[in-house]
Structure formats: structure tokens, C-alpha cells
Amino acid sequence: MKRRATAVWQGTGKEGSGHLTTQSTVLNQTQYSFSSRFEEGIGTNPEELIAAAHAGCFTMKLSFNLSGAGFVPETLETGCIITLENGTVTSSQLSLTASVPGIEEEQFANLVKDAEENCPISKLLATDISVTYTLNA
């Protein structure tokens, strides 16, 4: 399987602007700029997209882990904060709220750890990854 996206940029790094389009067209000439990346401008930015990708990947991997262990999650909600410092992504902090009937805390913690370490986006990121969670069993 291969997925693709395209970035188009015009102008300088600070004054220019660009847009992103994904294969699925969920992003379709979606604006990004210096302002949307480093200030509070309108549009998206690479770090926001990495945060969405990591949250989605981790959550799906955890769902597969839970199903494989015989549990059906009612809800898994994961937030992600990507930190960019001095031109480097230095961390990805995942924050999970889960409702999984019948699971014990220790087993849940082990399945979370496996998802943290083995979702494809975690494997891709060469950074510090942490997960905090709240379990409503």
C-alpha cells in the first residue's frame, strides 16, 4: 500500500504560502504558511498533520490490540501534541480517554504500551513518545 500527498509552495519561507492536497482529497489545496505554522494564522501545518496522524494511528492500533484480547472498546479518544523546538520534532504526547468494559488496568496498560511502541507512525517518529490515559472500564 502506498499513500501520497502533494505540497506546493510559492515565495519565500516567511512571506510565501502553499497548499497541501492528499490522495483522498480530504486535504484539497489546504492552505499552509509561515503564519499557520509558527503563529496563529489560518491554515494547517506539518506538525498538526503529524499530530492527527499519530493520534489516529495509535488509536486504531490500540483498537486492534483490544479486539485481539477479546475486548470491544466503547470509546477511544486520543489527543496528540507534537512539540517542535529549534527545527526538530522533540516529542509526541498522546493523551487517551478510553471506555473499555471488563478490562483490568494492568492488561489495558500493556495493550496501550504495545500500541505506543508499534503503531506505524510511532515507529516512523524518531522522537520521545509518551502516553497518558484515563480508563473507564
Image (spheres, grey):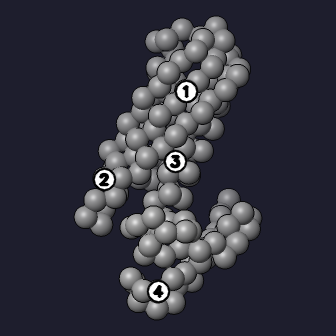
Q: Nearer the viewer, mark 4 or mark 1?
A: 4
**First along the sequence among labels 4 and 2:** 4
Q: Which mark is residue 97?
A: 1
Which residue lies most toward the right here?
24
Compared across the picture, whether 125 is left or right of 60 comes to: left
Badges 4 and 2: C-beta atoms under 8 Å apart? no
Would you place residue 92 above or below residue 3 in this image?
above
Disc 4 to disc 2, how far (Cα)?
A: 26 Å
Residue at disc 3, secondary structure? helix
Q: Nearer the viewer, mark 1 or mark 2?
A: 1
Q: In the rendered structure, which amino acid carries the disc numbered 3?
A: His
Disc 3 to disc 1, how far (Cα)?
A: 15 Å
Q: Nearer the viewer, mark 4 or mark 3?
A: 4
Q: Residues within 10 Å of mark 2 (few under 14, many from 20)?
A: some
Badges 4 and 3: C-beta atoms under 8 Å apart? no
Residue hosting label 2? 90
Disc 1 to disc 2, how far (Cα)?
A: 23 Å
**First along the sequence among labels 3 and 1:** 3
State the residue in front, 113 or 18.
18
Q: In the rendered structure, which amino acid carries the disc numbered 2?
A: Thr
Residue at disc 2, secondary structure? strand
Residue found 53% across the figure and 18% down from its top:
135
Residue hosting label 3? 54
Task: List x then y, in percent, for residue 39.
Answer: 40, 66
